[in-house]
Image: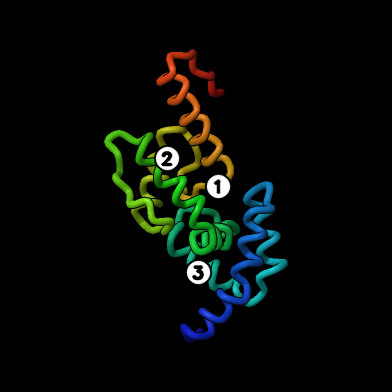
Amino acid sequence: MDPLTILQLAIQYGPIVKAAIDAAWSNDDLGTKIKEVAGPLVPILEKIGGDLFPKAAPVLHAVGGAMAAFDPNTTKWLQGALNSLLDPSPNLTVDGIYGPRTRDAVLKMQEKLGLRSDGLAGQITQGAIQALLANKDLKAAGKPEMKIS
């Protein structure tokens, strides 16, 4: 597909895909929503997701592509959190671009947390990172940490 067609599809379907990301309850739900609303953009998202997240299950490639392409605010949060939590810090640029350095930092965090390591920061990975950040804040405030099971 030529670059102009891809750009036109991204402009046309971008807001719809972002709305699906915001409304999804899980990665599976998001995959279903993307396939329902993004039609001709789905193969492009699958290609992006497959290239960026080769360790992810193929069913999640469109999800990964959509998150990388259309969810920069979550990616910025993720990059900041990874900079704060990983030691030594990966020193990611907090730019909202879910590129190879962000993916590799996510892989490192998933391994540290004992999660499935595919580099895709879906609902479970994001939840675990939020819990770690909360514990870090509690510890800094001198309060007992939460137990994560």
Type of the residue with mark 3:
Lys
Direction from residue 65 to residue 86 in the image, left or right: left
Q: Position of residue 103 (x, y in %)?
A: 40, 52
Q: Nearer the viewer, residue 50 or 125?
A: 125
Q: Residue furthest right?
A: 36
Direction from residue 92 to residue 109 in the image, left or right: right
42 in relation to 147, above or below: below
Type of the residue with mark 2:
Ala
**Residue at screen point 47% across, 20% down:** 138
According to the picture, the residue beneath numbered tag 2 turns out to be 81
According to the picture, the residue beneath numbered tag 1 turns out to be 122
**Residue at screen point 57% across, 63% down:** 62
144 in relation to 116, above or below: above
- CA–CA distance between discs 1 and 2? 14 Å
- Tell me if I can see residue 61 in this picture: no
Choose the circle earlier in sequence order: 1 or 3.
3
Residue count near mark 3 (Cα–Cα under 10 Å), binned few <14, some 14–19, many ≥20: some
Q: Residue furthest front?
A: 141
Q: Position of residue 99 (x, y in %)?
A: 39, 58
Q: Position of residue 134 (x, y in %)?
A: 50, 28
Observer-side mark, 1 or 2, equals 2
Mark number displayed over residue 47: 3
Secondary structure type for disc 1: loop
